[in-house]
């Protein structure tokens, strides 16, 4: 993570100690599993594409900022592993490609909450907002049949810094979860988030311009107040 990436978190820490309005700010350490898929259109009408999900890891830190009693803001940064498996088939070719893409993902989510009257210090919460991911690495492992010949290939699929489409992924996240007060100051949470990637993977290459990230994340977290 670059020093610039830490600026929003440092600002939140400073503001939380100086402003009464942010006295309820809390920091949450989160970890979970990404069920990641690459959604893509077939490169030609004669081809059939099949997408399969892969399970990967996500860990991160969020700052939870209350705006009103039932509405807050969540600012987050996570190391998020994504990717998927694509299988393409036509009359003479069958190819399967596993892609593993790792990102630093930043999120800015609105968080409406509803207290649970029957469960003290607990609430149901919902999430919606944008995400922006910066690619850390990209690797692929491909195998297939080209007519009667079996071929394999593996390596890095990084697009390079000049290919913004390959290095960045803009998305929209939505979901929900439950936060439970385990003490007067600490809350545990379990959330389910769905992130819809908007930017195709692969930069300028038209063959790879189609795949977009689709990620279902199950995460747990522990939040402590910093105000």
Image: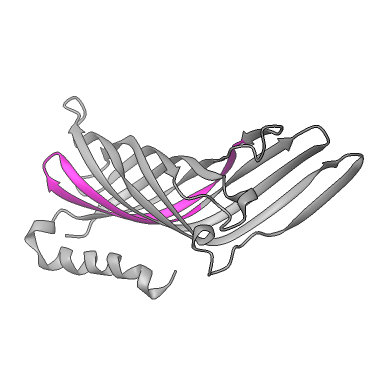
Residue 172 lies left or right of residue 38; in this view the side is left
Q: Is residue 77 above or below residue 41?
A: below
Residue drawn at the location 82% of the way across and 50% of the way down: 152
| Residue sitting at the far front | 45
Please provide the residue range marked out in magenta: 52-80
Residue drawn at the location 59% of the way across and 63% of the way down: 159
Residue 139 lies left or right of residue 77; in this view the side is right
Quarter containing the C terminus: bottom left
| Residue sitting at the far bottom | 3
Q: Is residue 82 magenta?
A: no
| Residue sitting at the far right | 148
Q: Nearer the viewer, residue 9 or 108?
A: 108
Residue 131 at x, y percent in the picture: 37, 51
The part of the image, by quadrant, that contains residue 4 is bottom left
Residue drawn at the location 29% of the way across and 65% of the way down: 9
Residue 62 at x, y percent in the picture: 32, 54
Classified by dominant secondary structure, the portion drawn in magenta counts as strand
């Amino acid at each position: 993570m670059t020093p610039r990436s830490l600026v929003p978190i440092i600002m939140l820490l400073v503001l939380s100690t100086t402003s009464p309005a942010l006295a309820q700010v809390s920091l949450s350490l989160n970890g979970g599993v990404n069920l990641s898929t690459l959604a893509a259109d077939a490169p030609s009408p004669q081809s059939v594409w099949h997408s399969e999900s892969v399970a990967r890891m996500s860990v991160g830190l969020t700052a939870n900022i209350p705006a009103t009693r039932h509405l807050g803001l969540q600012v987050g940064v996570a190391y998020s592993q994504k990717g998927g498996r694509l299988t393409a088939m036509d009359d003479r070719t069958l190819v399967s490609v596993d892609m593993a893409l790792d990102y630093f993902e930043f999120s800015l989510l609105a968080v409406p909450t509803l207290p649970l009257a029957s469960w003290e210090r607990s609430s149901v919460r919902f999430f919606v907002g944008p995400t922006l991911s910066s690619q850390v690495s990209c690797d692929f492992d491909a195998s297939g049949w080209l007519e009667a010949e079996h071929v394999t290939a593996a390596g890095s699929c990084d697009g390079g810094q000049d290919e913004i489409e390959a290095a960045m992924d803009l998305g929209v996240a939505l979901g929900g979860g439950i936060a439970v007060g385990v003490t007067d100051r600490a809350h545990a949470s379990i959330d389910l988030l769905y992130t819809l990637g908007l930017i195709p993977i692969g930069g300028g290459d038209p063959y790879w311009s189609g795949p977009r990230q689709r990620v279902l994340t199950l995460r747990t977290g522990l939040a402590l107040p910093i105000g």
